[in-house]
Image (cartoon, grey):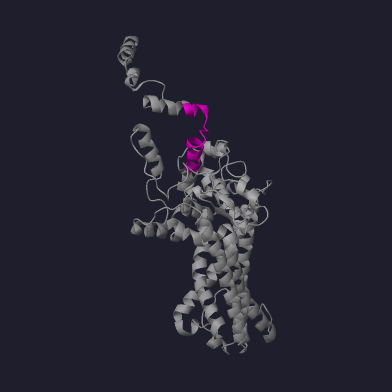
C-alpha cells in the first residue's frame, strides 16, 4: 500500500509539473497574432499522418532516418509497457497486461526487447555522429554559447547528449527489471511465485538471466528488480518534464504543428489585408481604408507579437537538426543567414518575454507587467528585429526559395517569419539596399524592375532580323 501511495504521489507531481510547463508554452504561443487554420481538416489530418506520424520527410537522408525510426517506433511500442507499469503502480499488481493478453503479450515483449536493444545501439551511433564525427549541420553560430546580454537556450549539443544518455539509461533500467524478474521467478521468489506464472517471452533478458547476471540472492534480485521498475518509470517522468525546455519537445509539438501547417503552395506569399487597404487608398484618393480593430498594428513584424501564433508554434517545434540551414543557398555561399537561427531566436525571445513577465500593450509592444521582475525594463527594450536577435543582414540574405521549409521534417515555415520581418524593414523603416530602392521605383514608374518604360519592352527584339541576316552572310 505504501508503494502505491508513493507511486500516486510521484505520478501526480510529474503530471502537475508537466501541465504547468505546457501552460507556460501555451501562453507564449498566444502572444502571436490570430490566424485561421481551421480549413481543409481532411487534408490537415493527412499531412499530420504522413509528416509527423509517418516521418515522411525524414527519409530524405536514409542513415539518420533509419536510426531515428528505431527510436521512434520503440517510443511508441514501449509506451504500452509504460501503461502496464502505471496500472501496476496504482493497483499494486504485477505485469497486469500479461495476465490477460496471452500470446499477444509474448509478441509485445519480444518486439519490445529487440527494439530496446536497437535503441541503445542507435543512441550510441547518434553520439558518435555528434561528438566524434562532428556532422557539419550540427554546428553554427546559433549552437554556440551566448556571449551577449540575452539568455539564450543554445545548449543543443548538451541537450542532445542528455537525451541520448537518458534513453540508454531508460533501456538499461528496463532490462534490469526484466532480468531480475525472470531470475526471481526462476527461484520461486517472484511476485507471481514461479517462472511458469511469469507472462511474456524475453529473448534478450533471458540470455542475461540464464547467465545469472545479478547473482542468486533473492533479496539482491528483488532490490534490482525494484530499482529497474522505479528507475524506468521515474526516468520517463523526468524525461517528460525535461521536454518543454529541450529541442526534443518536437516529440509532442510535431503533431499539432504539422496539422496546422501551411497547405498553400510554398511559393505563395501572404499579403495582409491592411496592405491591400493601403494600396487601394494610394491609387484612389477617395477610398477610405477599412480599419480592422483586431488587425496587425504595423506592416510586417518587429517583435514576436507581430508574428502569428503559428510562427511562434513553429519555434517550439524546432528540432535544431540543421537540415534547413544545410540546404539554404544563402548560408552555403557564406551569407550570415541561418534559417535555424531565425527560428531559435523567435523561441528565445518568447522565453525572454516569459522570464521577465512582459505583456503586450495596446500597440502590440512588449512592456513590463505589474508583477515583472528586475531586468524587465531592459528586456522590454529588446525586440526580435535588432542587434540582440535577428539582424537586417540575415533577413536581406534570404532568397525566399523555400529550400528550408521543404527540408524541415516537421513543416516549420521559416520563410514566413523572414518575409514578415523584411516587410517591416521595408514598409515601416524604408530600410533596404540601394539597388532594391531603384528596383521598387522602377516597378512603381515602369511596371517592371528595369529602368525603361513598358512601351520599350520589346525593343530588344528589333535587331533580331539584322543579327540573323549577318549570321547567314557569315555562313
Q: Nearer the viewer, residue 369 or 43?
A: 369
- Left/right placement of residue 376 relative to residue 63 reads right
**Magenta stretch, residue numbers:** 418-437
Tell me the chief SS of the magenta region. helix
Answer above or below: position of 369 versus 79.
above
The part of the image, by quadrant, that contains residue 86 is: bottom right
Please identify the quadrant where the N terminus is shown. Answer: bottom right
Q: Position of residue 289 (x, y in %)?
A: 37, 40
Identify which residue, 381 or 260, lies in the foreground: 381
Give the position of the C terminus as an image quadrant: top left
251 vs 33: above or below:
below
Residue 470 falls within the magenta-colored stretch: no
Judged from this view, the residue extending furthest toward the top is 473
Asked if the magenta segment contains residue 421, the reply would be yes
Find residue 394 and report its image quarter: top right
Residue 257 to residue 427: above or below: below
Decide if residue 426 is on the left or right side of residue 124. Answer: left
Using the rendered view, name the quadrant where residue 170 is placed.
Answer: bottom right
Q: Is residue 139 visible?
A: no
Q: Position of residue 113 (x, y in %)?
A: 54, 72
Reply above or below: 8 against 436.
Answer: below
Find residue 224 and report its horizontal and vertical position in percent: 66, 79
Q: How many marks are shown on the rendered structure? A: 0
In this picture, residue 182 sits left or right of residue 469 = right
- Provide residue 350's location: percent of width, then percent of height: 56, 53
Q: In terms of depth relative to the viewer, which is nearer, 471 or 454?
A: 454
Q: Residue at x 45, y 43 (%)?
A: 402
Q: Can residue 3 be seen from the camera position used here?
A: yes
Amino acid at each position: 500500500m505504501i508503494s502505491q501511495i508513493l507511486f500516486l504521489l510521484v505520478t501526480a507531481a510529474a503530471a502537475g509539473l508537466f501541465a504547468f510547463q505546457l501552460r507556460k508554452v501555451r501562453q507564449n504561443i498566444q502572444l502571436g497574432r490570430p490566424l485561421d487554420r481551421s480549413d481543409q481538416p481532411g487534408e490537415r489530418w493527412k499531412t499530420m499522418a504522413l509528416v509527423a506520424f509517418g516521418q515522411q520527410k525524414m527519409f530524405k537522408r536514409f542513415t539518420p532516418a533509419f536510426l531515428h525510426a528505431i527510436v521512434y517506433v520503440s517510443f511508441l511500442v514501449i509506451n504500452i509497457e509504460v501503461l502496464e507499469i502505471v496500472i501496476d503502480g496504482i493497483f499494486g499488481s504485477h505485469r497486469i497486461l500479461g495476465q490477460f493478453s496471452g500470446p499477444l503479450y509474448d509478441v509485445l515483449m519480444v518486439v519490445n526487447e529487440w527494439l530496446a536493444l536497437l535503441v541503445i545501439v542507435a543512441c550510441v551511433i547518434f553520439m558518435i555522429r555528434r561528438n566524434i564525427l562532428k556532422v557539419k549541420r550540427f554546428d553554427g553560430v546559433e549552437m554556440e554559447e551566448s556571449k551577449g546580454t540575452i539568455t539564450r537556450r543554445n545548449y543543443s549539443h548538451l541537450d542532445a547528449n542528455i537525451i541520448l544518455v537518458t534513453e540508454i539509461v531508460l533501456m538499461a533500467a528496463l532490462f534490469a527489471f526484466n532480468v531480475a524478474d525472470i531470475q526471481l521467478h526462476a527461484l520461486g521468489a517472484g511476485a507471481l511465485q514461479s517462472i511458469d506464472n511469469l507472462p511474456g517471452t524475453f529473448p534478450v533478458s533471458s540470455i542475461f538471466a540464464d547467465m545469472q547476471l545479478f547473482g542468486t540472492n533473492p533479496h539482491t534480485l528483488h532490490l534490482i528488480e525494484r530499482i529497474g521498475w522505479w528507475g524506468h518509470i521515474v526516468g520517463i517522468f523526468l524525461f517528460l518534464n525535461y521536454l518543454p525546455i529541450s529541442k526534443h519537445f518536437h516529440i509532442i509539438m510535431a503533431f499539432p504543428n504539422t496539422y496546422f501547417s501551411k497547405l498553400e503552395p510554398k511559393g505563395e506569399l501572404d499579403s495582409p489585408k491592411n496592405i491591400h487597404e493601403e494600396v487601394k487608398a494610394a491609387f484612389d484618393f477617395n477610398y477610405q481604408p477599412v480599419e480592422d480593430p483586431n488587425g496587425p498594428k504595423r506592416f510586417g513584424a518587429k517583435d514576436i507579437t507581430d508574428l502569428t501564433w503559428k510562427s511562434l508554434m513553429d519555434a517550439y517545434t524546432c528540432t535544431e537538426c540543421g537540415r534547413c540551414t544545410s540546404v539554404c543557398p544563402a548560408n552555403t555561399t557564406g551569407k550570415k543567414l541561418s534559417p535555424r537561427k531565425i527560428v531559435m531566436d523567435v523561441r528565445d525571445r518568447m522565453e525572454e518575454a516569459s522570464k521577465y513577465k512582459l505583456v503586450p500593450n495596446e500597440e502590440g509592444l512588449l512592456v513590463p507587467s505589474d508583477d515583472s521582475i528586475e531586468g524587465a525594463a531592459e528586456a522590454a527594450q529588446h525586440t526580435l528585429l535588432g542587434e540582440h536577435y535577428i539582424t537586417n543582414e540575415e533577413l536581406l540574405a534570404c532568397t525566399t526559395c523555400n529550400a528550408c521549409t521543404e527540408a524541415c521534417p516537421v513543416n516549420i515555415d521559416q520563410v514566413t517569419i523572414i518575409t514578415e520581418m523584411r516587410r517591416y524593414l521595408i514598409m515601416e523603416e524604408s530600410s533596404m539596399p540601394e539597388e532594391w530602392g531603384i528596383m521598387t521605383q522602377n516597378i512603381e514608374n515602369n511596371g517592371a524592375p528595369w529602368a525603361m518604360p513598358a512601351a520599350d519592352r520589346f525593343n530588344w527584339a528589333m535587331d533580331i532580323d539584322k543579327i540573323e541576316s549577318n549570321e547567314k552572310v557569315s555562313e
